[in-house]
Image (cartoon, coloured by chain):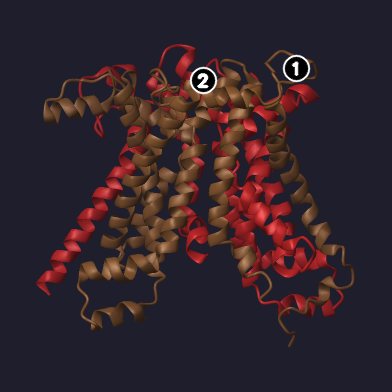
Chain colours: A red, B brown
Amino acid sequence: MKNDARQQIFYYTALILLACMSLAPIWVMISTSFKDEVTLQGDTPLWFFFVPTLQNYESILFGRGKFDTYLLNSIIVAVSTTTITLLFGGFCAYALARARFRGRSFLANATLLVRMVPPAVLAVPAFAFVMLSGIDNDLAALTFLYTAISLPFAIWLLFGFYKQIPIELEEAAIVDGATPLQVFFRVLMPLMTSGYAVAGIFTFRIAWNEFILALLLTGRNTRTLPVAAAGFITEEGVEWGRIMAMGTLIVIPPLLFTFFAAKQIIAGMTAGAVKG
Amino acid sequence: MAEPGTKPRWEPGALTPYAFITPAVLVMLGGLLYPVVMAFYLSFYDWEIGRDLGEAPYNGIAHFARMIQDPQVWEVLWVTLRFGFWVITIEMTLGIALALLLEKPIRGASFFRTIFILPLMVSPVVVGLIWRYLFDARAGWINYYLQAWFGIEPQVWLGDPQLAFFAIVFTDIWQWTPFIFIIIIAGLQALPSEVIEASEIDGTNWWQQIFLVKLPMIKSIIIIALLMRIIDVFRGLEVMLIMTGGGPGRSTELLSLHIYKRAFETQQLGYASAISVLLIIVVFGLSLMILNMANPMRTRSDV
């Protein structure tokens, strides 16, 4: 009994320490974003007790930069990437899960193989393509690339969810004369909400966080938030308050997803290794 | 009751499955396969930024011949391997040890796991910015606490080759140890409890249970996690680009970052493509190993 209690204390102490280590750097960013120059120049790092200010956020949101444009760019790219990936990926995963066709296993393998293509490999050809073809819609080019990058993992996740749906439901609908497309949208879509939610979170996160391709392919008016944040480093010295405010704004959507859907995110992360 | 395997709805039009896969296949062909093929193609040409691709002289395998003798390529390969060795050894050891210690289901476990995956959700750019600040020589908190607690003189972390290397290793460990932890703990909790109980009845002690029962049973999960991390080491460049830009010198320049800098800082697109062919081969080789161990879409396909 006594041993048990001691073990409990050990577990929780260890977990709390680890949680602090995970959180501390993120908290440093968030707290720094609320500090003014004077506080930042102080001798001791202040974790909690300082006079918070919104001036960093005000300077970003209403300052000379085009924060609203960058935010809008990021949202456009992330939302369209997610929408297209879920639609195309859903179609593909459905066919892979339910149909037998020539080339099926080749497609399944190739999909997982290209999942790992390094961004550095995509960079030069993508840059070359955009330059040579004279495409002047950077955001469309980015969306296309992000969709390609996200599709393999999305297909893979959605495949698992389609496999879990009992086949009888679709058969009943077929007997009633539904076409495959009607089955896909009317019968299966409502059952797939959690699958689409998980795949959507992972896809949104890729498009929202991506930096290298966005840096290469976007110009002054088409930057996304990560590119704009990195730009703060060189433009006029390093202003940590503003940089951290920008970082905090970038981190908000992924953190919200984590708090609302941690279980699903963990399931998605572990699916590859554990189920196989 | 339909037999598994008879799938009536697909029979009428044999082309229906193809219609369903076409959009995704086209996007992946254009956005992933085309760039890879293009990288191979470009690696045979001496192409630089600002020049028309049509005017770029054909170069044969000259880039590859140069690559083999290029001390910079060998240097960044060595940096990549050293970086990979340290981060993967430490992350795997820590992640597995913590998972074994903390696997027992306890109250609040899901809350803690939520906290642990936060570093994984943060954008690499933001990770780079946070740690650049923490390691900053003047404003950085790390220097402050080292001096306050241990009396260590302030260091110029990101300006010294060895310290900068340590800094990027430390940052990677912060971000990715939770990944190993989460995967291993999921594997451990998926183990059939009968086996663990049986081993307890057989009188195995705690250490024997770990090394003779648990770890061997999750061996494939450990290997897949390991391979995924190795691939990530070869793919990663954003955190280093923000924290150090690869410097000082090339002390923190990983292979991916080197390709990026070759292409867009020294503007040698053709040569950079040749190096990226090397990267593709390494990453696809490792991916094939993972595929052989686990491809749910293949193994469960025609059941």
User: Badge 2 local density, few (<14 within 10 Å), some, or many (20+)?
Assistant: some
- Name the residue type under label 1: Ala
- Residue B295 lies in quadrant: bottom right
Q: Going by the picture, which residue comes out furthest to the bottom?
A: B1
Residue A61 seen in render:
no
Q: Looking at the image, is mark 2 or mark 1 nearer the viewer?
A: 1
Chain letter of the residue carrying label 2: A
Which quarter of the rendering shows the C terminus of chain B?
Answer: bottom right
Q: Which mark is residue A231?
A: 2
State the image coordinates of residue A135 (x, y, percent, origin top left): 78, 26
Mark 1 and mark 2 in contact (Cβ < 8 Å)?
Answer: no
Q: Residues within 10 Å of mark 1 (few under 14, many from 20)?
A: some
Q: Residue at x 31, y 64 (%)?
A: B103
Label 1: element kind: loop
Q: Is residue A77 above or below residue A33?
A: below
Q: Position of residue A216 (x, y in %)?
A: 62, 24
Residue A224 coordinates in the image, percent (x, y): 59, 29
Q: Does residue B58 appear left or right of residue A18 in this picture?
A: right
Q: What residue appears at the point 30 percent right and 51 percent down from the top-left corner?
A: B93
Q: CA distance from mark 2 to mark 1?
A: 32 Å
Amino acid type, callout 2: Gly
Q: Residue at x 30, y 50 (%)?
A: B94
- Frontmost residue, A114 versus A16: A114
Q: Who's the residue at 39% across and 77% down the image?
A: B192
Give the image location of residue B273, x and y in percent. 64, 28
The circle on residue B56 is: 1
Instruction: Tell me if A66 is positioned left or right of B57 in this view.
Output: left
